[in-house]
Structure formats: C-alpha cells, structure tokens
C-alpha cells in the first residue's frame, strides 16, 4: 500500500512540475516578446532621430551612446529578442531533466525493492532446506521489513516445532525400548510357566504355584500398560486437568483409603498433620493419583512396624506437603534420577517398575507445582510445593 502511494506521489509530482514549467515558459515568452518589441521600437526611434539630425549610421549612433555610458556592446544583447527567446526555450529542458532524475530514482528504488524480495526468496529457500540459522529481521518500518520480521517469527516457531518433534521422536523411541524391556521379562516368565504347566508329571501344588506366578506377572503387565497410558495422555496433552480449589486434607484422606490394606499388612504407623482449612489449586483425582504413587513408594521401602508421616504448612507463596518414611536411605547416586521413567536404584524394591514417581512428577508439573526428594539418616522425605495463583 505504501509503495503504491509513493509511485502515485512521484507521478503526480512530475505531471504538476511539467505543466507548471510549460505554462511558465509560455507566459515568460509572451511577456518577453512584448517587452522586446517595445524596447526595439524605442531604440529604433532614437537611432532614426540621430541618423536624421546628424547624418550618422545606426552603428555609429549605438557606439556613441555606449561610450557615453561606459558600457559594452554585450549589454544591448539583453534587449535582443532572438537571444531572449533562445534562453527561454532552454527552460523546456527542466521537465526533461526532472523526468530523467525521477526515472533514475524510481529505477534504483525498484532495483532495491526487487533485491530485498530476492533476499526473502533466498531465505525461504534455505528454510525449506532445513537451514534455520539465517536471521532476516529488519528494523525499518516499511511493508517489506514487517514481512521479513513476520517470516522470521514463523521460522522460529517452525524451528521450535521441528526441535520438539525431534525430541518427541527420541522420547518415543526410548519409551518403546523401555516398554519392550519391561514387558519382555514378565512375558518370558509366563511362557516358561506355561511350558511347565503343559508337562504331564507336575503336582497340583506346583500347578497352583505356577498359576499364581502367572497372575502376578499379568498384574504387573496390566499395571505397567495402564500407567504408561496415563503418562502418555499427560505428556501428549490429551488430558485436560480440571484445576479448581480442593481441600488438601480430603486429597490425603482419599489417597490413604486406597492403601489401607498395605499399611495394615506391614503394620506401618501413619500420622497425618494437616490443617483442614488448607486448600490448593489442583485437579483432585490426578493429585490423588500422584500422592498414591508416593505413598506406595514409601510403604515399599518402610520396614514392618515403621513410620510414615504426612504434614503440610502454608505460606503466602505456596502450600508445602511433606511425606516422610523411615527405612533405607536412598543413595546420593540415585537421588538425581529418582523421577526418571523406569529408573530403579541400587536398593530398588523387587516389585518396583520405576514408573510411579515419574507419573507423579508429570502430574505435579502439569499443575504448575514442584516436587523434590531428600534422603538422610534413614529417613526419606518427598516435598511437594503447590504454588498459589
């Protein structure tokens, strides 16, 4: 739009200048012509008088006049009609010169404009080849500069998407490899048990043992697949968390109800110190899932008749929830990797798959929270911070 306006402005300026010059030349020529005729008549009369009275020629009269005035013959040229007309006719060169200058300026403008378009075209060609390293940003205020900046923004977004897809591809390959490894072990065990069950010479007691073993392995596979589906849904964004104000005490109560049996079997002493007036902005069901995974981990690593303590405190910035269990201390080498998928530490529980804590971390992060772990003096503490909006 600005370029069209510029072209129209140049053309209109040229047209106005041309016609103004043309009209000025006509008026000037007409005026000079009349003045020259009048002057020539007067000079002619004066010369005739001197010629008649003194018998001098016209040239002699003019020479006498000029000498008396200390003037040169060239002075008389300004009264010469022919010279004046020749001078005025040169004024016609003004629009021609103006036209040439404007044409040159316009040519260089178009040349520069096309050069910048070619630069954009080359940049897009490089982007199509997968080269995002070039920077096409321009800090001028014309339309091409705006276009170049917008193209650069789109290029940055494309690069981020490309990097994200590449990272997701690597994660998918890693996940599939981990899943294959995790499922292979129980499947192998099931196949071996089935081969033993098909043998003729096997007691009923051994059959029952093998069947129970198969059941456990199938339960493990079912848990693994279910957990992976949940994590996959969280990571892919297909799960939209229902974030709302929830009572933290109710979340903990619901989580504990799902694990009462395991607590009773190991005779673990559980203490909960949470103010019933503490609320957090979270998805109730998914947060219960996260707390259950932490409590399962705590129960697995707490010895019989051990202790698990749950407490919370509130400040103007966040609500801090701590879950502490007695038992084996997590080694310093394992602590940085405790939330990685399928990671099993040196002292990992035999039934541990290494997926529960990873799911917990994903849930807490989706809720804009933070989770850390600290292990020392035979005590392990998971700390979750629910930040206030």
Image (cartoon, rainbow, N blue to C red):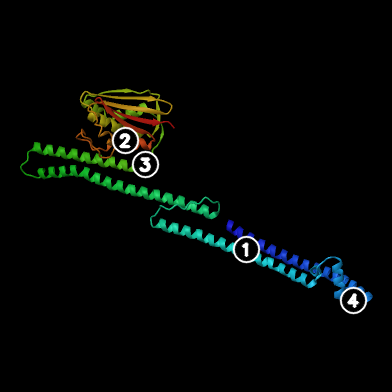
Is the residue under label 2 in contact with that under label 1 (CB below 8 Å)? Answer: no
Provide the secondary structure element on which disc 1 rests: helix
Q: Residues within 10 Å of mark 2 (few under 14, many from 20)?
A: many
Q: Residues within 10 Å of mark 1 (few under 14, many from 20)?
A: some
- Which residue was labeled with disc 1? 102
Q: Which mark is residue 360?
A: 2
Provide the secondary structure element on which disc 3 rests: loop
Is residue 1 something that shows in the picture? Answer: no
Which sits earlier in the primary sequence, circle 1 or circle 2?
A: 1
Which sits earlier in the primary sequence, circle 4 or circle 3?
A: 4
- Which residue was labeled with disc 3? 239
Q: Nearer the viewer, mark 4 or mark 3?
A: 4
- Quote the CA–CA distance across marks 4 and 3: 120 Å
Q: Which mark is residue 247?
A: none
Residue 152 % position (x, y): 46, 51
Which sits earlier in the primary sequence, circle 4 or circle 2?
A: 4
Residue 241 % position (x, y): 38, 38
Which sits earlier in the primary sequence, circle 1 or circle 4?
A: 4
Residue placed most toward the observer, 380 or 188: 380
Which sits earlier in the primary sequence, circle 1 or circle 3?
A: 1
Q: Quadrant of residue 213?
A: top left
Q: Residues within 10 Å of mark 4 (few under 14, many from 20)?
A: some
Horizontal arrangement in the rendering, residue 377 relative to residue 241 (left or right): left
Q: Which mark is residue 56?
A: 4
- Quote the CA–CA distance across marks 4 and 2: 127 Å
Horizontal arrangement in the rendering, residue 145 relative to residue 51 (left or right): left
């Amino acid at each position: 739009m600005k370029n069209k306006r510029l072209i129209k402005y140049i053309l209109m300026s040229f047209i106005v200048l041309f016609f103004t010059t043309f009209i000025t030349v006509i008026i000037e020529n007409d005026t000079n012509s009349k003045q020259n005729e009048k002057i020539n008549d007067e000079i002619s009369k004066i010369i005739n008088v001197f010629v008649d009275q003194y018998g001098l020629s016209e040239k002699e009269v003019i020479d006498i006049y000029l000498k008396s005035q200390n003037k040169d013959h060239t002075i008389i040229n300004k009264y010469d009609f022919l010279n004046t007309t020749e001078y005025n006719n040169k004024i016609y060169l003004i629009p021609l010169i103006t036209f040439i200058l404007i044409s040159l300026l316009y040519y260089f403008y178009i040349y520069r404009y096309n050069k910048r378009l070619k630069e954009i075209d080359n940049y897009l060609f490089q982007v199509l080849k997968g080269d995002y390293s070039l920077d096409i940003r321009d800090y001028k205020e014309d339309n091409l500069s705006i276009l170049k900046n917008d193209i650069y923004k789109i290029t940055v977004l494309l690069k981020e998407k490309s990097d994200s897809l590449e990272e997701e591809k690597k994660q998918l390959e890693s996940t599939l490899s981990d899943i294959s490894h995790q499922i292979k072990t129980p499947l192998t065990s099931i196949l071996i048990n089935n081969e033993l069950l098909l043998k003729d010479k096997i007691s009923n007691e051994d059959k029952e043992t093998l069947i129970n073993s198969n059941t456990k392995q199938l339960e493990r596979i079912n848990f693994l697949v279910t957990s992976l589906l949940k994590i996959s849904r969280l990571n892919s964004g297909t799960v939209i968390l229902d974030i709302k104000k929830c009572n933290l005490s109710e979340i903990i109560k619901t989580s504990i109800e799902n694990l009462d049996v395991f607590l009773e079997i190991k005779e673990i002493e559980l203490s909960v110190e949470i103010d019933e007036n503490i609320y957090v902005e979270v998805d109730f069901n998914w947060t219960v899932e996260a707390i259950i995974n932490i409590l399962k981990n705590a129960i697995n690593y707490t010895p019989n008749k051990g202790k698990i303590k749950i407490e919370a405190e509130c400040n103007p910035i966040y609500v801090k929830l701590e879950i502490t269990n007695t038992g084996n201390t997590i080694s310093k080498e394992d602590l940085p990797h405790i939330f990685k998928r399928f990671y099993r530490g040196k002292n990992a529980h035999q039934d541990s798959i290494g997926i529960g804590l990873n799911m917990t971390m994903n849930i807490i992060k989706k809720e804009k929270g933070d989770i850390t772990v600290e292990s020392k003096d035979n005590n392990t503490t998971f700390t979750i911070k629910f930040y206030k909006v």
